[in-house]
Structure formats: C-alpha cells, structure tokens
Image: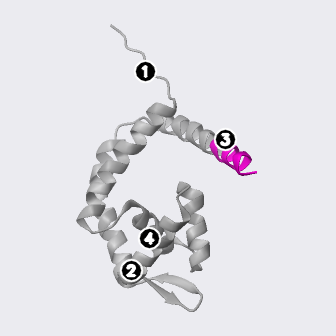
Amino acid sequence: MTTTAPAADASALGLAHYAARGVLEHFLAQHGLTFQQQLTLRAAVTADAPWTPDELAGRIRDDIKGDPADIRAAIDALLDGRLLVADGAHLRPTEAGRELIAAVGARIAPVSARIWGGIPAEDLAAAGRVLALVTERANAELAALAE
C-alpha cells in the first residue's frame, strides 16, 4: 500500500504554524512571555544595532502583520519588565532580556530538534523555497490591498 503525501496548501501551512507555535508558547508561558513579546525581544537581542521603538515595532509588524497597538503593548511590557531599556532614542536589551532569550532557546532546542529531526535536507530546501515564495506573494497581496 502506498500513501500519497498531502499537497501543501494554506490549511496545511496554518496547521503546522499553530502546532509549532503552541509548543513554543508552552515554554514562553513558563517564563511569563507572550509570543509577541518573545518575537520583539528576540529581534532586539539579535539586531546588529539598537533600534528606535518605531523601528522595532515596524520590524515586528512587517514580520507578523500584527496590530501596531498590540506591538507597542509588547514593547511597553518588555520595558516595564526591564528586559528592554531605553538608551536615548534607542532600545537595548538588558542582560536579563538576553538571558531570558537564551533560556527559552535552550528549553525549546531539544523539542525543535525532535520536530525537525530526520527530515531530509532536500525536503527542507524544497519547503523553504515554497514558503519563501508564498511569503513573497502574500506580502505583495497585502501591499496591494493597502493601496
């Protein structure tokens, strides 16, 4: 008996996203972070140079198409929790913020390895190409809708 792999479509993409996000959110909750706060803090930690609040909010909005008010609330929560600090016009992650991102990464790494492990490199490459194209096309559609 042979089985045919399901075709990739919006539903399959959504299910995979929410399953993986659910795993991540389990670990984030243990550290008192929301998904949006983690994305925002990780962007600040991994940035080559500090960003202004507007730049950081714009980056997150571009990445997840989130509500600007919700993104600002995430930034405010990170500032209130002393995970980010204002340094003049820019935001910098604090040592506590860097340690938290590292701790979450360490907790999720073995789970992520189990989820992604054993998938052939050529399958990952093909999926990466498809996802990049879907992202590009969806972003173009969103830009056209905004006009």
> Which badge, 2 or 1, is on the more N-terminal residue?
1
Query: What is the secondary structure assignment of the residue under circle 3?
Result: helix
Res. 89 mark = none
Name which residue lies at 47% across and 74% down.
Answer: 75
- The mark nearer the N terminus, 3 or 4, is 4
Task: State the separation of the CA atoms marked 3 and 1.
Answer: 24 Å
Residue numbers of the magenta segment: 137-147
Q: Mark 1 or mark 4, which has the lower sequence index?
A: 1
The disc at residue 137 is: 3
Pointer 2 local density, CA inside 10 Å: few below 14, some 14–19, many at least 20: many
Q: Secondary structure at mark 1?
A: loop
Q: Residue at x 33, y 54 (%)?
A: 24
Look at the image and tell me in which quarter the N terminus lies. top left
Query: Residue 144 vs residue 112: left or right?
Result: right
The disc placed on residue 83 is: 2
Alpha carbon distance from label 3 to label 4:
28 Å
Check residue 109 for magenta coloring.
Answer: no
Tag 4: amino acid = Ala
Which is more foreground, mark 2 or mark 4? 4
Q: Residues within 10 Å of mark 4 (few under 14, many from 20)?
A: many
Give the image location of residue 28, x and y in percent: 30, 62
Residue identified by numbered label 4: 74
The amino acid sitting under disc 1 is Ala
Q: Secondary structure at mark 2?
A: loop
**What residue sits right under mark 1 in the picture?**
5
Picture quadrant where residue 63 is located: bottom right
The furthest residue to the left: 30
Q: Work out whether mark 2 precedes mark 4 in sequence or the reverse, and give the earlier one.
A: 4
Distance from Cα at disc 2 to Cα at disc 4: 11 Å
Question: Please, what is the dominant secondary structure of the magenta stretch?
Answer: helix
The kind of residue tagged 3 is: Arg
Which label's residue is closer to the chain start, 3 or 2? Answer: 2
